[in-house]
Image: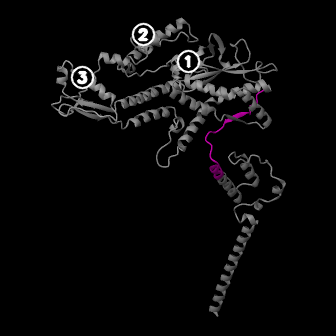
């Protein structure tokens, strides 16, 4: 759509004309392509400049384990002879790259991520997810020894595992991954750490352990398998380097989210795609919309002065007088001022710029950030939902389901920490001990009462129809966590054991009176039989009378 420009015309026309400026159609030139390519990171741009640089960028890395220099060169030559490098350079991806479409994304680097982590909206997105992942924490289950579970729960509190978990998932959101270092006091960190009942390092009266969160900016892989995808350690480093110290992978509990494709794992330090990097593009667009709308407010009102410009330019003092008049008009431009102009040679008019729809554009760009973060606007931004009978409860329920699924990604890490704490403090691992994440989406009391009433009513109907016994009813009620009756004993009290099933008080009136229903049915059958016999006798008597 062509833009409209307002121009100041000569006094003889005495009006404002709206003319349409012709917007030249964008042509694909070398300069335009160069401007577009300027948006691409320098490292990525250089990698595809020539076929030689493509070979240098996409050759096998020097850090690849299991191959020496000669083997890597042979594999590179085989890939080149098969046309692999030419396919990269002359592919559709290269064509789109030449057009400035930026189809290539890569890891932006930890230095950039450290700067992005300071952005307010990025922090709100990452912190909201991290807070909800660790807010309700866990509940230990699976063991009949309640004292042991209580002691283990207190040990989790003493080791500050909840705070460590929160810090680890927060770092994962910013950096794509994080590590929890298991410090047992061992000097040789290249030795593997065995987390089982045979571990000599984690057992004994002198055994101790500490857990330390390590930022991935300090960690880099050393030894990893990238040649045999049939092994379970494919693209999983066996050894890490932490600022010059070699550390076995078993001593670092790894947190990863947003797993990248297998070919990009080395680019992301064998961790995940940072959530901050995913959000950054959408946050940039939101900031651009917000800043553009703010600039529009400064131009919402334009004061147009119509005057004789020929007279102003021809008079030696004309420009000075004109500037003084414009400065005077600008200084006293408010609702309380009065501007006087020549009726015949001058006029003043105000042109208003509409801002309708700008709020919707800014709001939509902000909601898109929340959408990418999979967080409802009412949770992330505090924006109340609009519409008839809108409460936002369904959005929160879906969000809590997403949090629950995200918590399961870290179950193995938390279970490993539980095993380590058991070995250090109890000397052995109880395989029955596990945990459940406390649900975030709790029903209100009224809803819980209605749910419990419905469940008990359904179980009672099964007892009335003799589909289950009283003992089975008691066990079902005791095991249902929603009913809150788990304090009941497994066995029935003596007074209930002596009572029969039909003596139990239920909603069925027949069951409250023993076998009354069966007796009534028997009486009805006897009555029907008697009526049938009487009808036969009456028919026989009628037949005899007719014969006589």
Q: Which residue is under mark 3?
A: 321
Q: Residues within 10 Å of mark 3 (few under 14, many from 20)?
A: few
Tag 1–tag 3 contact (CB < 8 Å): no
Q: Residue furthest bottom?
A: 548
SS type, badge 1: loop
Q: Earlier in the sequence, mark 3 or mark 2?
A: 2
Q: Is residue 2 visible?
A: no
In the drawing, what numbered circle is on residue 53? 2
488 to 96, vertically: above or below: below
Q: Residues within 10 Å of mark 1 (few under 14, many from 20)?
A: some
Which one is in front, 415 or 170? Answer: 170
Q: Residues within 10 Å of mark 2 (few under 14, many from 20)?
A: some
Q: Which of the two marks, 3 or 2, is nearer to us in this view?
A: 3
Q: Residue at point 52% right, 20% down? A: 113
Which one is in front, 392 or 208? Answer: 392
In the drawing, what numbered circle is on residue 351? none
Q: Which residue is under mark 1?
A: 269
Image coordinates for residue 18, horizontal then vertical, percent: 22, 33
Q: Is residue 323 visible?
A: yes
Q: CA distance from mark 3 to mark 2?
A: 64 Å
Q: Which of the two marks, 1 or 2, is nearer to us in this view?
A: 1
Residue 434 in magenta stretch: yes
Image coordinates for residue 90, horizontal then vertical, percent: 37, 16
- Displayed quadrant of residue 143: top right
SS type, badge 3: helix
Q: Earlier in the sequence, mark 1 or mark 3?
A: 1
Q: Residue at point 28% right, 34% down? A: 350
């Amino acid at each position: 759509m062509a833009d409209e420009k307002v121009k100041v015309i000569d006094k003889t026309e005495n009006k404002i004309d709206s003319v349409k400026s012709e917007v030249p159609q964008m042509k694909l030139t070398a300069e335009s392509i160069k401007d577009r390519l300027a948006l691409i990171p320098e490292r990525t741009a250089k990698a595809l400049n020539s076929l030689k640089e493509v070979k240098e960028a996409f050759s096998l890395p020097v850090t690849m384990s299991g191959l020496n220099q000669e083997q890597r060169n042979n594999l590179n030559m085989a890939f080149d002879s098969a046309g692999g490098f030419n396919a990269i350079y002359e592919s559709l991806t290269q064509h789109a790259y030449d057009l400035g479409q930026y189809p290539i994304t890569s890891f932006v680097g930890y230095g950039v991520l450290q700067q992005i982590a300071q952005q307010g909206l990025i922090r709100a997105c990452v912190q909201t997810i991290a807070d909800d992942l660790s807010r309700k924490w866990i509940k230990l289950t699976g063991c009949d020894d309640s004292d042991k579970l209580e002691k283990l729960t207190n040990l989790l509190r003493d080791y500050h595992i909840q705070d460590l978990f929160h810090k680890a998932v927060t770092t994962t959101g910013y950096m794509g991954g994080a590590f929890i270092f298991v410090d047992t006091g061992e000097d040789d960190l290249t030795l593997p750490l065995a987390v089982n009942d045979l571990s000599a390092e984690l057992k004994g009266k002198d055994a101790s352990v500490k857990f330390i969160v390590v930022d991935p900016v300090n960690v880099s892989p050393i030894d990893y398998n990238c040649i045999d995808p049939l092994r379970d350690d494919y693209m999983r480093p066996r050894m890490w380097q932490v600022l010059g110290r070699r550390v076995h992978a078993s001593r670092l509990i790894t947190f990863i989210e947003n797993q990248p494709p297998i070919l990009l794992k080395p680019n992301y330090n064998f961790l995940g795609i940072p959530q901050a990097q995913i959000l950054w593009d959408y946050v940039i667009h939101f900031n651009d919309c917000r800043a553009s709308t703010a600039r529009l407010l400064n131009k919402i009102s334009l004061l147009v002065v119509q005057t004789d410009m020929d007279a102003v330019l021809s008079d030696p003092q004309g420009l000075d007088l004109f500037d003084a008049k414009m400065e005077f008009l600008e200084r006293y431009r408010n609702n309380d001022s009065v501007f006087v102009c020549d009726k015949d040679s001058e006029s003043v008019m105000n042109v208003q710029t509409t801002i309708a729809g700008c709020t919707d554009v800014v709001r939509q760009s902000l909601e898109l950030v929340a959408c990418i973060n999979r967080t409802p606007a009412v949770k992330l931004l505090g924006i109340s939902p609009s519409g008839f009978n809108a409460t936002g409860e369904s959005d929160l329920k879906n969000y809590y389901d997403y949090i629950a699924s995200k918590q399961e990604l870290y179950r193995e890490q938390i279970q490993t920490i539980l095993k380590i704490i058991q070995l250090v403090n109890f000397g052995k691992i109880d395989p029955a001990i596990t945990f459940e994440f406390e649900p975030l989406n709790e029903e209100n009391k009224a809803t819980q009462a209605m749910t419990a009433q419905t469940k008990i009513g359904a179980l009672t109907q099964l007892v009335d129809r003799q589909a289950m016994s009283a003992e089975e009813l008691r066990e079902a009620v005791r095991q249902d966590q929603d009913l809150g009756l788990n304090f009941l004993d497994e066995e029935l009290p003596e007074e209930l054991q002596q009572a029969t099933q039909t003596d139990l008080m239920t909603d069925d009136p027949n069951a409250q009176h023993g076998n009354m229903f069966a007796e009534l049915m028997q009486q009805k059958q006897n009555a029907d039989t008697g009526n049938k016999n009487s009808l036969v006798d009456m028919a026989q008597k009628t037949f005899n009378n007719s014969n006589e």
